[in-house]
Image: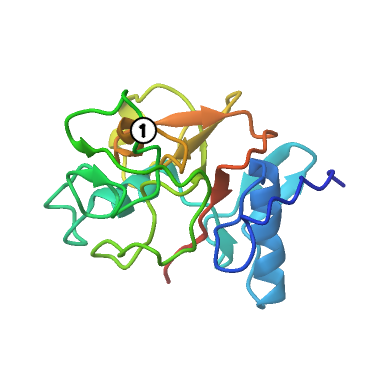
Amino acid sequence: GRALPEETGWGTGPHPIVNVSWYDAVAFCNWLSRTTGLTPVYTIEGEVVTADWQANGYRLPTEAEWEFAARAVDGIGGQKVRFGNGKDTASATTMNFDSESHYNRAYVRRGPMRGQTVPVGTFAPNSLGLYDLSGNVREWCWDWFDAYTSQNRDIDPRGPEKGDFRVIRGGSWRSYGYSLRSSNRDNNNPNDRDKDIGFRLARSGP
């Protein structure tokens, strides 16, 4: 198996999990699916991972699903906002990020930087009831990272067939405000772990 990451204490209790690679995340999804009597989504053979999109188990969100959840204020997609908590302005009172930085933009209100994760539920959810889509921890998505192409106009796109890096979204406690925008895209080597990288669970509907 893979070596265990250093335990910081931030990924325990009500805090979001951190220090997990993309491979750790998909393995956890399968473990939780089996534990709860669901059909695992992923077939994992070393570093080759395939998905059964008809399975009812837990999985990582696709990048398109993640952005819809962060942007769709009314739950349908008619109204869009800049940040995943339903706001157009970032501040230390509404999300966890590097709010002290001089690199922040006009839509960022400066304030104290916490320097670590905060418990889930510290800030209000967006209109879909989802917490911390902007800030706290960066989140792995299913997709390989690539430039947006015509495939992104498909219904429920799932990204490129191959790549070198996996998509990460949302920004974290040490990100500048502009990195927390719902439109901001990031990527990492799927083997990487870091103290501000975690993930969010998803499941396909019936």
Residue found at x 64% / y 34%: 190
> In which image quadrant can residue 154 be found?
top left
Above/below status of 203 relative to 20: below
Residue found at x 16% / y 47%: 80
Which residue is at the far front? 112
Image coordinates of residue 49 in percent, x first then y, are: 68, 42
Which residue is at the far bottom? 37
- Horizontal arrangement in the rendering, residue 3 relative to residue 127 (left or right): right
Which residue is at the far right? 1
Query: Dot 1: few (<14), some (14–19), or many (≥20) neighbours within 10 Å?
Result: many
Image coordinates of residue 151 in percent, x first then y, are: 35, 31
Query: Mark 1 — residue?
Result: 179
Image coordinates of residue 198 in percent, x first then y, are: 57, 48
Residue found at x 45% / y 35%: 159
- Horizontal arrangement in the rendering, residue 8 relative to residue 124 (left or right): right
Residue found at x 67% / y 68%: 32
Q: Quadrant of the C terminus?
A: bottom left
- Horizontal arrangement in the rendering, residue 196 relative to residue 114 (left or right): right
